Amino acid sequence: MLAQLRNVIDPDFGEDIVACGFIKDLAVDEAAGAVAFTLELTTPACPVKEMFQRQSTEFVKVCVCGGGGREGGGGGG
């Protein structure tokens, strides 16, 4: 799962959101096909917050069920 989230790159730091330490409380329930995590950014008003949420959700969906899985990721700010 973290490998998928490494595809989301912070344009300011030039690093992925995992390396930046933005992913918190990662929980994977393989039996249910569910993933949850908190996306904790440096500031609540982060201008790329929505982009991070959208991209991380899409990458997690691909990992869970080839694009059709359920997820609860991307919350926070």
Image: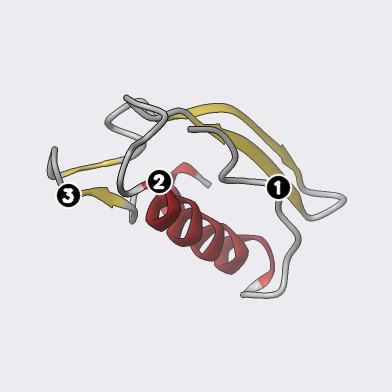
Instruction: Return the residue at label 2.
Output: 49
In depth, the one of 62 and 43 nearer the eye is 43
Instruction: Return the residue at label 1.
Output: 72
* Other-residue count near label 1 (Cα within 10 Å), few / some / many at <14 / 14–19 / ≥20: few
Q: Are marks 3 and 1 in contact (CB under 8 Å)?
A: no
Give the residue type at disc 1.
Answer: Gly
Instruction: Return the residue at label 3.
Output: 11
Sequence-first tag of 3 and 1: 3
Q: Secondary structure at mark 3?
A: loop
Which of labels 1 and 2 is toward the front?
A: 2
Say which residue appears at 71% left-offset and 47% top-offset.
72
Which of the numbered marks, if any, corresponds to residue 59? Answer: none
Sequence-first tag of 1 and 2: 2
Q: Secondary structure at mark 2?
A: helix
Residue at the right extreme, as displayed:
32
Q: CA distance from mark 2 to mark 3?
A: 11 Å
